[in-house]
């Protein structure tokens, strides 16, 4: 209460006293006792009224005690079941959660984690373990330093950052209870298998295998790679205390289109306890890279022969050379190359535009730029009757395919007519122009959606230079083949598009997404899409409808067993369908562990001033929790300021005083 308020209350008391004395001591008649009683009542009434008018604030303070938090975070993944620790973890959780002393000192909250972090009962069915994510989620919910986090887990994480280096933002102590057999047994395992998801038919593709050994004795075991039971690769490996791992790199041939499954195994150690990690299954999607390429030209030039050899270097490709008048059925080709087009190309270029067929336009000294400028294809050039030489230079920032492996330094220049080309719209530049030794900002080879423009003739000189430097044509042939492949993949728009993974694992969600467009190529959400799925081995069929999402259709086939499948998607009422194939591979990452990850659990608890315990050390854990000076209750004081006029009891008190005074005066006949 302020000094000003106190002075007002004193003044109110004095004034109330003067009013009561004047009213009953001076003016009123009667005995002294009656006048004193009435004066006292009048003093209280007037003073109460003044107090309500002054309205002083009353400050109240309430003190409460907040218990520290104990957060129990339990591993709910399949790995706990695989290492046969579900009963031990459940019992440990129950002991800690129901302990009387812990409940007396802490507010206990419980969570489970695996694929997700949630407040549920333990089921040990999650297919992933995300420890780092669980710790981050706890930090979002609990931010006070007097909070203890206790992690119940085997410590084996399958997804996320290394939690061993996790540090609490709020200096909260983190304890861990490790589950699993910590005794070390001799073990051989395939630690990792690296390979591209895709390979082209007829090509060789690399496979990298890392094999690890835990043990003391020297042993020899064979690593084998098989396909359909046939041994494709076999190698004898010798392990010892000083040689505990091998990195094996080999090449396999993609000999048939579709998903090819390869089994990779390492022979087991004698009496080896855990055999799941002795094998691994690898799936490769083999794609037929076949392309039908058409080159249109009405002149003869060495470049045409060079392009023929580049395209034909892939035996799966077909290459045809025609004049504009000889073109028929243009829709059969994945790519058209228009070499130095003139007005005679008009009809065929109009067909290509109507059908959205990918096209590469190569210009040179014989190109009719007046004709090209009228097409409105995104490039325009004002020329004069003079030629120039332009050197190639790899563009910076090209991301459509990898060009880091290519080198075109010292390549001879291309010849073209003099003039600056103006490029419109969004384009990507693969090659830039260099005039003499000066780099320019002018693209030499640029891409628009399904079109590309190369400004210059003389590709055949690049191949000769490449051969002179390396005794082969691989560098330039590969660069241009990638260019052709990139363009060919953009062939015409389709109204039904499918998006799915061709290789899937049994421990992950398997979805097929579809987009259907009307004739104006706008997404159509009114159609019904159905699927027919067939197991290629058993012949078993599954029919399921797609579910409409916000801007696509989706089919969840995660319930299918492992195997190879082919499927057909049909749009009801549109007579449009599309087929595909996928494989579900039996691989459970949670079943790759057989001992707890003591190292990371120890690092985590040491980093956060906690402790690592085992399931038979719960008493020691409780002792540390109960005696940690950081985990003490916090006193919380709440101060409130209340206006006196809000107290209804004072108004009632005033009414009682006035009523009592009136009643007594009435009783004595003074009213």
Image (tube, helix red, strand yellow):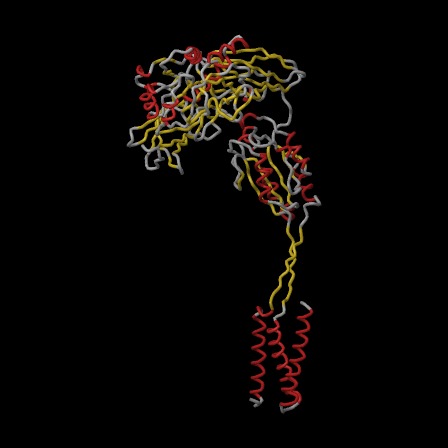
User: Residue sitting at 38 percent across and 31 percent down?
Assistant: 514
User: Residue sitting at 58 percent across and 89 percent down?
Assistant: 668
- From the image, which quarter does the N terminus lie in? bottom right
- From the image, which quarter does the C terminus lie in? bottom right
Residue 245 pos. (x, y %)? 62, 17
Q: Identify whether 504 is placed above or below 87.
A: above
Residue 329 pos. (x, y %)? 30, 18
The answer to which quarter of the image holds residue 163 is top right
User: Does residue 315 appear in this view?
Assistant: no
Is residue 407 shown left or right of residue 483? right
User: Residue sitting at 69 percent across and 41 percent down?
Assistant: 624
Q: How many badges with numbers are in the image?
A: 0
Q: Identify whether 91 is placed above or below 67.
A: above
Task: Give the residue at the far bottom of this rendering.
Answer: 29
Q: Nearer the viewer, residue 514 or 214?
A: 514
Q: Nearer the viewer, residue 52 or 84?
A: 52
Q: Identify whether 472 is placed above or below 578.
A: above
Residue 290 pos. (x, y %)? 40, 16
Task: Give the residue at the far front of this rendering.
Answer: 385
User: Does residue 498 appear in this view?
Assistant: yes
Q: Nearer the viewer, residue 465 or 34?
A: 465
The answer to which quarter of the image holds residue 99 is top right
Q: Identify whether 143 is placed above or below 534.
A: below
Residue 262 pos. (x, y %)? 48, 17
């Amino acid at each position: 209460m302020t000094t000003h308020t106190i002075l007002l209350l004193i003044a109110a008391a004095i004034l109330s006293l003067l009013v009561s004395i004047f009213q009953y001591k001076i003016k009123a008649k009667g005995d002294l006792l009656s006048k004193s009683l009435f004066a006292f009542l009048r003093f209280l009434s007037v003073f109460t009224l003044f107090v309500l008018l002054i309205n002083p604030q009353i400050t109240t303070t309430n003190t409460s005690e907040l218990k520290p938090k104990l957060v129990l975070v339990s591993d709910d993944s399949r790995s706990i079941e695989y290492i046969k620790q579900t009963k031990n973890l459940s019992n440990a959780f129950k002991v800690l959660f129901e302990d009387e002393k812990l409940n007396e000192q802490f507010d206990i909250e419980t969570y489970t984690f695996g694929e997700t972090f949630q407040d549920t009962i333990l089921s040990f069915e999650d297919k992933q373990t995300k420890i780092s994510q669980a710790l981050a989620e706890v930090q979002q919910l609990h931010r006070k330093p007097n909070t203890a986090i206790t992690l119940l887990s085997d410590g084996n994480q399958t997804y996320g950052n290394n939690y061993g280096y996790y540090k609490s933002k709020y200096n909260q102590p983190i304890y861990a209870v490790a589950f699993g057999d910590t005794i070390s047994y001799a073990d051989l395992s395939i630690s990792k298998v690296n390979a591209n998801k895709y390979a082209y038919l007829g090509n060789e593709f690399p496979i990298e295998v890392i094999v690890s050994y835990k043990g003391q004795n020297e042993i020899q075991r064979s690593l084998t790679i098989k396909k359909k039971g046939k041994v494709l690769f076999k190698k004898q490996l010798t392990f010892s205390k000083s040689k505990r791992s091998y990195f094996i790199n080999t090449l396999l041939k993609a000999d048939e289109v579709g998903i090819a499954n390869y089994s990779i195994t390492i022979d087991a150690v004698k009496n080896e306890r855990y055999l799941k990690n002795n094998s691994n299954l690898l799936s490769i999607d083999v794609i037929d890279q076949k392309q039908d390429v058409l080159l249109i030209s009405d002149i003869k030039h060495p470049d045409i022969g060079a392009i023929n050899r580049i395209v034909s270097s892939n035996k799966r490709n077909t290459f045809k050379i025609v004049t504009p008048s000889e073109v028929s059925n243009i829709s059969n080709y994945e790519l058209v190359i228009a070499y130095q087009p003139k007005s005679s190309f008009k009809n065929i270029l109009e067909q290509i535009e109507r059908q959205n067929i990918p096209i590469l336009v190569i210009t040179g000294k014989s190109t009719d730029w007046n004709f090209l400028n009228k097409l409105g294809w995104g490039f325009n050039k004002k020329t004069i009757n003079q030629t120039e030489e332009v050197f190639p230079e790899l563009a910076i920032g090209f991301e459509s395919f990898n060009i880091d492996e290519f080198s075109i330094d010292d390549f001879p220049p291309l010849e073209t007519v003099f003039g600056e080309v103006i490029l419109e719209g969004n384009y990507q530049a693969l090659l830039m122009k260099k005039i003499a030794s000066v780099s320019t900002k002018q693209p030499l080879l640029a891409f628009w959606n399904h079109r590309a423009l190369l400004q210059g003739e003389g590709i055949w000189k690049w191949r000769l230079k490449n051969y002179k430097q390396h005794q082969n044509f691989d560098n330039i042939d590969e660069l241009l083949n990638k260019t052709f492949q990139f363009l060919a993949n953009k062939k015409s728009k389709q109204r039904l598009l499918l998006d799915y993974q061709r290789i899937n694992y049994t421990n992950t969600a398997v979805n097929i997404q579809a987009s259907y467009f009307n004739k104006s190529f706008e997404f159509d959400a009114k159609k019904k899409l159905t699927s027919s799925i067939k197991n290629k081995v058993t012949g078993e069929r599954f029919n399921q409808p797609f579910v409409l999402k916000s801007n696509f259709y989706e089919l969840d086939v995660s319930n299918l067993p492992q195997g190879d499948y082919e499927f057909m998607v049909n749009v009801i009422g549109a007579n449009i369908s599309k087929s595909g194939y996928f494989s579900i591979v039996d691989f459970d990452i949670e079943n790759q562990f057989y001992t707890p990850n003591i190292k990371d659990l120890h690092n985590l608890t040491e980093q956060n001033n906690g402790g690592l315990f085992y399931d038979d050390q719960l008493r020691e854990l409780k002792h540390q929790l109960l005696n940690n000076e950081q985990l003490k209750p916090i006193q919380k004081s709440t101060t409130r300021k209340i206006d006196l006029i809000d107290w209804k009891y004072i108004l009632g008190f005033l009414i009682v005083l006035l009523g009592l005074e009136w009643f007594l005066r009435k009783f004595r006949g003074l009213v």
